[in-house]
Every structure is written in C-alpha cells, then in structure tokens.
Image: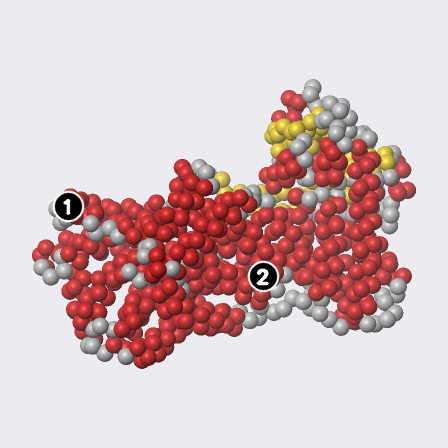
C-alpha cells in the first residue's frame, strides 16, 4: 500500500463509516458525499468510479423491491397476516411459533424490512389486545427475521452482495446456508420461549381470555382486512414472484443471473398489471440503492489503492493458514462487526479481503463465503443498528407505544447472536472437516 | 373476576362498537362465547364459575352494551332454570350452554330483521337523511331500503375517522348516494335534509338513551332546527336501569401538538334525553316514550 496516496481514501471511508454507523446523516447522502469528495480531490475520476459499481446487485435489489411493493399493494400480506392471527386463536405459544415461521419464510424470500413492516403491527395488535406485553414478541420477530433472511441469496442485503459479486447461485445459498439456519431458528425460538415461558402460558383454561381472543380477531379482521384487496394484481404479482424464484433455482440451466431475473420479472409485472409506474417507482427504496452505489465506489477505490490487500495481509493472514481458524475468524469477526457496524458496507469491504484470503488459502466449497454470509447476517441481531430491519421494527414498535431501548435490545440480542454464531461455527467446522 | 380480563374486554367492546352497531357487536360477542366454550379446557365445577365470570365481565363492561347485557341476563335466567345443569358432565354442560346461546342469537337476528322491516316504513323516495355513526339504521335499514328500490340520499357527518369510514364503506357497498361533511357544517344543510336517523347502546328507565359519542350535539342541533329525529332500537336495548349506571368510560390521554403537552379527556358514549327524539322505532313498531317500560325484556 502506498501510505501517502491511500491516506485520503481511508480518511473519507472512515468518516463515511462513522456517519453511517451513528446515523449522523442519511446513509446514501454520506456514501455519495464521500464519492464526491474523492472525485473533487482527484483521488478517482467520475468515469473510473462508475466502473466500481456492481450493477448486478442493484438490479436484483430494484427488481425485488418492485415485485414486493406490487404484492404488498395487492393486499396479499394482509390476508396472510390475518389468517395467521386466526390460526393462533390468541394462544401465546402459537402466536410466537406461527408468526416466527411466517417471518422466517417471508424474510428468506422477501427483504427483511418489508417482512417486519407487515408482521410487527399485527403482532403488536394481537398481543396487546390479549393483554400481553408485545415487547418480547416484537423482539422475537426481529431476531427471527434476521435469521430467516440468512437462508437465501435474496433474504438479506449481505447475501445479495456476496451472491452478485462472487457469482454464487440461489441454489448454492439455499443448499449451504439452510442446513445451518434451520437449527439456529429452532434453538433461538426455544431460547425465546424459555426465557419468557411465564408469558407463554396457555389460555384455554380461562374463558374470559378465550372470549376476548374471538373479539380481538374480529377487530383485527376488520382493521386489517378493510384494506382493498386486488385479486387480479395478487395473482399476477405472485405468479411473477414464483417465476422469479423458479428462475433463480434454475440459474445453472438458464444461465440467467439473479439480477436479470428479478428486474426482468418486475418489468413483466409492470407491463401485464398496467400499473401506474410512477406510483410503483415511488415505493422503490432509492436511498438504499444510492447507498449501495456510493459504497461500491468507496470500497473500489480502497481496493485500487491497496488498502484492502493491506488489511487482508496484516489482519486476517496473520492468524496463519489453519483453515478452521480462518473460517471461524471470518465468521466471528463478521458477526461481531455486523452487530455494531452496518453489515452492508462491512460485507462490501470484506469481499475483496476474502478473495485475497482464498488466493493464499484455497478453502473448498466456498466455505469462507458461507462464513461471511452467516456472520454478516446473524451478527445483525446484536444491536439495534446491526440491521436495517432492527431500526425499522423498533421505529414501528415505538409508533405503537412499545418502547425498546438500545440496551434492552442488546441484552437479548447478544445472547441470540451468541447462540446463532456458536451453531454456525459447529456447522462450518463439520462442513470444513467433510470437505478437506 | 380478574380486573385485567375486564379491562381487556371493555377495551375490545369500545373498539368494535366503532365499526359495528351495538346489536351487531352483541351478535359477535354471543358467537365469541360459543367458540370460547368449545375451546375451554376445564372440569365441570370450574366451567360454571368461568361462565359466571364471563357473564359478570360482560354486564359490567364500560360502557354497558345492549342488547348483549340483556341477553346475558336472559342466559343466566335460563341457566338458573336448569339449576346450572343437573348433570355435571362437562360435555353436556358445554352443549347445553351453546344451545341456549344459539337460541339467543336466533332471537337477536330475528329482532334485527324485524327492526329493519319496521324502519322501512320511515324511508320514502326523495329523503335526504342525516347519519353520523355505524348504528342499526346504517347497518340494517339503509341497505334493506336500497334493495327495495327506494331512492334516497344520505348526509354523513364526519366525526371519528374509523366510524365515518365504516359508514362510507356501507354506503359504497350498497350503492347509496351520500355526501360527507364535517359535523360542525350541518347548520348549512338544514334546508336540504329532512330526517335524522340514530341508534342507541341502551334506552334507560329515566327517559334517556345512551349512544355513540357525538350523538348529543347532533340531536340537540336537529331538535332546535325542528328536523324530525328517528331513534332505531331493538326492544332488547331497553333496560330497567338508570342512565347513571351505564358505566360510561372516561378516557384521559396525553397529547402533544406543536410542542404543547396537554391532557385530552373524552367519554365513550353520550347520554341524551328521549324528549328530544320524535320517533322511537323498535322491532315491534313505533313506541311512545311513556310506554317503553312495558316492553322491557328483563
């Protein structure tokens, strides 16, 4: 690394990182302002900077955002939420388990923020109406959402980035991460039940509570089902999502990259549904996309100036060449760092480092990538700022009068993350042992 | 009786009655009791105490809600007649209780349809009727009159957002022409409208009726402007109790507007004098105010 030359990009990167982590300014504004500074100071040029952007990731995110916003507009999620509420019949354990399953599945195939936006209001309504404290239920859904999102390529932004930049397929993500995610889901759920077991007592011995549940379901049915249901749009948007997932799965046969599939299906849906494109595009999280764009450039410049290589050599490669140590170190460093830093810039920064690690230590079966994915996604549960879904959920909960402080979150989040990372470690060690 | 269970049920009653009439809320509650009986897991002795507890919670609700209040009294009377089940077998006790409640549901459904029939006599072509909340006239009468081909319009007075939206939903669903105005704008419409239709939670023995909050203002204003006021209420809403015993719920909540903190106080329902009402329409036809007590069911 040329220390004198690299000073500016490092400084800009660190300032942007601090601004993002402590939410001093809007994330997208911080990242793009950083790029602006680098261009003005002639560290890079605007034409050169564009080359660092991973358009595959942006296409995948944009496509999924459009698909999800159309499904949401059709009222499908409302129907699902109300049905789940009916099935639970207000039984605390059923609320926990059924909502957790739905949250995990939704997070795996949609983005986590959309999942919590749908699930958190209804779970608060249901539990509060029952005279239960919604706090633990909200926390459980946040944790489960981050765990569920770990299972697929499209479940969590770190996976989207890893998948697109490394070229790992949808199937590879499912086949390699789901075996770790399922036991994590079950054990974390068991832990949540155990620490709150007094609250999860059955209600079928109390007739007043049973009557209240029925009335509450009537209220929820009215409030949530009063949203306009567009059956035509629902069929078309679900068909497009199903087709997109099918094309993700058959990527090795079709050769179509996930970004192309997602954006392609989103365009098909916009055309066949004759939707108001302007209105749909308002639902796309442009600030997130711009945030990604800025970060790709910032990390690209760091990579060009040899900073990433320096970190890889001086931090990660210092631990030696034992593959077990390297895999576990990537997992735990990613996990802990993602808890306190935004996992998106962290993942983008780690990708070139992992590439360098693999050059000197070729660990088979992409285990190092799975290690990064598991760490970056599962570590998001440590603090409120660990993942976007955490911040959004805590915000929604506050709007509904449920206060979750940073410390409250962290006390439970640390244990959930510890359990998750320990299970992930066991999984990776076994996987590595079988691969070597 | 658990205070927490009482608070939970009271709050649900207050929420549900925002978008359904008190008669509809009563039907939902009876069906909820049936489902609860089916799901309840307990021994025979506990079953009776649980049943009594639920009845006590419902009849002590804030606010008291009719017809369910009277129906629960009828239910308890029937249980007493059966000596709280001679056969102490839980399955028999459950099915016997459900049977009584199903009969009460049928009775209420019949009364509601009779109220709609009676009400039809009071809607004529060309009427421009004032409404403000989801009460029996909105739920039962208007859709029925529209089905009969009567041509009328409705003036919806906007108050609570949830209530107003539900009134609009019902009008839309039944293709009834409507105009929405803020409640305080009614003064500009007295030369156009010709009737006010309202409902009640209860008709009390001291010559008053309890109804949705906001009713008192509207009734008073319409009375001053000599607009005919029609109160639609099933006989089962007549209670021998006084208006001061209706457990009107007082809500105090903190609000912050433009940085100013204050406490907002509101009541769950209004108490209005029956003297202001011109016509009391029940499922048994129009009844004079002074003869209401004769029709009291319990």
Mark drawn on residue B17: none
Question: Which structural element holds mark 2?
Answer: loop
Q: Residues within 10 Å of mark 1 (few under 14, many from 20)?
A: some
Residue A57 at least partly seen: yes
Q: Residue at x 27, y 58 (%)?
A: A165
> In the rendered image of this protein, does residue A300 appear above or below residue B114?
below
| Chain for disc number 2 | A
Q: Residue A87, image x and y in percent?
A: 61, 60
Residue beneath the point at 88% across and 69% down: B86
**Residue pushed farthest top?**
B191
Choose mark 2 or mark 1, whichever is in front: 1
- Answer above or below: position of B37 versus B26: below
Q: Badge 1 sits on which subunit?
A: A
Q: Nearer the viewer, residue A401 or A100?
A: A100
Q: Which mark is residue A132?
A: 2
Question: Which percent across, then down, holds residue A283?
Answer: 41, 44
């Amino acid at each position: 690394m040329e220390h004198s030359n690299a000073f500016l990009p490092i400084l800009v990167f660190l300032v942007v990182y601090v601004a993002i982590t402590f939410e001093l300014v809007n994330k997208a504004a911080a990242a793009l302002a950083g790029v602006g500074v680098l261009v003005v100071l002639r560290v890079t040029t605007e034409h050169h900077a564009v080359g660092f952007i991973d358009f595959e990731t942006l296409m995948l995110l944009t496509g999924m955002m459009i698909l999800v916003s159309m499904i949401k507009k059709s009222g499908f999620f409302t129907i699902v939420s109300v049905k789940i509420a009916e099935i639970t019949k207000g039984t605390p354990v059923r609320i926990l388990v059924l909502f957790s399953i739905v949250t995990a599945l939704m997070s795996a195939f949609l983005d986590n923020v959309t999942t919590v936006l749908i699930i958190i209001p209804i779970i608060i309504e249901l539990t509060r109406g029952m005279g239960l404290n919604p706090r633990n239920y909200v926390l459980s859904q946040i944790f489960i959402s981050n765990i569920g999102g770990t299972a697929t390529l499209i479940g969590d932004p770190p996976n989207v980035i890893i998948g697109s930049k490394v070229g790992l397929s949808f199937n590879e993500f499912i086949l390699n991460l789901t075996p770790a995610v399922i036991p994590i889901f079950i054990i974390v759920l068991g832990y949540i039940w155990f620490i709150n077991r007094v609250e999860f007592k059955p209600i079928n011995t109390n007739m007043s509570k049973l009557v209240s549940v029925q009335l509450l379901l009537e209220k929820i049915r009215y409030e949530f089902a009063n949203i306009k249901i567009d059956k035509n749009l629902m069929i078309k948007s679900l068909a497009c999502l199903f087709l997109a997932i099918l094309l993700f799965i058959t990527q090795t046969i079709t050769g179509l990259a996930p970004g192309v599939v997602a954006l392609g299906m989103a365009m098909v849906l916009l055309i066949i549904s004759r939707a108001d494109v302007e209105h749909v595009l308002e639902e796309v999280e442009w600030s997130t996309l711009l945030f990604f764009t800025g970060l790709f450039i910032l990390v690209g410049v760091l990579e060009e100036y040899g900073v990433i290589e320096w970190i890889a050599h001086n931090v990660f490669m210092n631990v030696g060449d034992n593959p077990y140590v390297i895999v576990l170190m990537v997992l735990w460093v990613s996990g802990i760092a993602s808890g306190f830093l935004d996992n998106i810039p962290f993942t983008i920064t780690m990708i070139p480092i992992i590439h360098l690690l693999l050059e000197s230590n070729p660990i088979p079966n992409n285990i190092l990538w799975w290690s990064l994915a598991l760490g970056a996604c599962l570590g998001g549960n440590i603090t409120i700022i660990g993942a976007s879904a955490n911040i959004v959920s805590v915000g929604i909960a506050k709007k509904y009068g449920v206060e979750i402080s940073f410390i409250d979150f962290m006390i439970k989040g640390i244990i959930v993350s510890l359990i998750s990372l320990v299970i992930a470690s066991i999984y990776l060690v076994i996987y590595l042992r079988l691969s070597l | 009786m658990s205070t927490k269970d009482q608070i939970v049920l009271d709050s649900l009653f207050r929420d549900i009655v925002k978008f359904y009439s008190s008669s509809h809320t009563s039907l939902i509650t009876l069906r909820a009791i049936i489902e609860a009986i089916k799901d309840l897991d307990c021994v025979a002795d506990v079953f009776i105490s649980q049943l009594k507890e639920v009845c006590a919670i419902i009849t002590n609700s804030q606010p008291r809600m009719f017809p369910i209040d009277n129906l629960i009294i009828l239910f308890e009377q029937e249980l007493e007649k059966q000596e709280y089940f001679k056969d102490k077998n839980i399955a028999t006790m459950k099915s016997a209780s459900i049977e009584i409640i199903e009969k009460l549901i049928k009775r209420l459904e019949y009364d509601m349809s009779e109220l709609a029939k009676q009400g039809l006599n009071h809607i004529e072509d060309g009427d421009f009727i004032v409404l403000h909340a989801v009460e029996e006239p909105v739920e039962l009468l208007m859709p029925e009159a529209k089905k009969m081909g009567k041509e009328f319009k409705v003036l919806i007075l906007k108050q609570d957002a949830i209530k107003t939206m539900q009134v609009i939903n019902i009008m839309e669903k039944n293709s009834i022409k409507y105009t929405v105005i803020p409640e305080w704008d009614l003064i500009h419409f007295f030369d156009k409208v010709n009737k006010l239709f309202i409902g009640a939670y209860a008709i009390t023995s001291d010559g008053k009726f309890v109804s949705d909050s906001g009713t008192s203002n509207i009734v008073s204003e319409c009375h001053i402007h000599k607009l005919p006021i029609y109160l639609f209420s099933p006989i089962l809403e007549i209670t021998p109790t006084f208006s001061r015993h209706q457990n009107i719920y007082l809500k105090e909540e903190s609000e912050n507007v433009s940085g100013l903190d204050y406490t907002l106080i509101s009541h769950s329902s209004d108490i209005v004098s029956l003297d202001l009402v011109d016509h009391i329409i029940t499922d048994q036809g129009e009844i004079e105010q002074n003869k209401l007590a004769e029709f009291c069911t319990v």
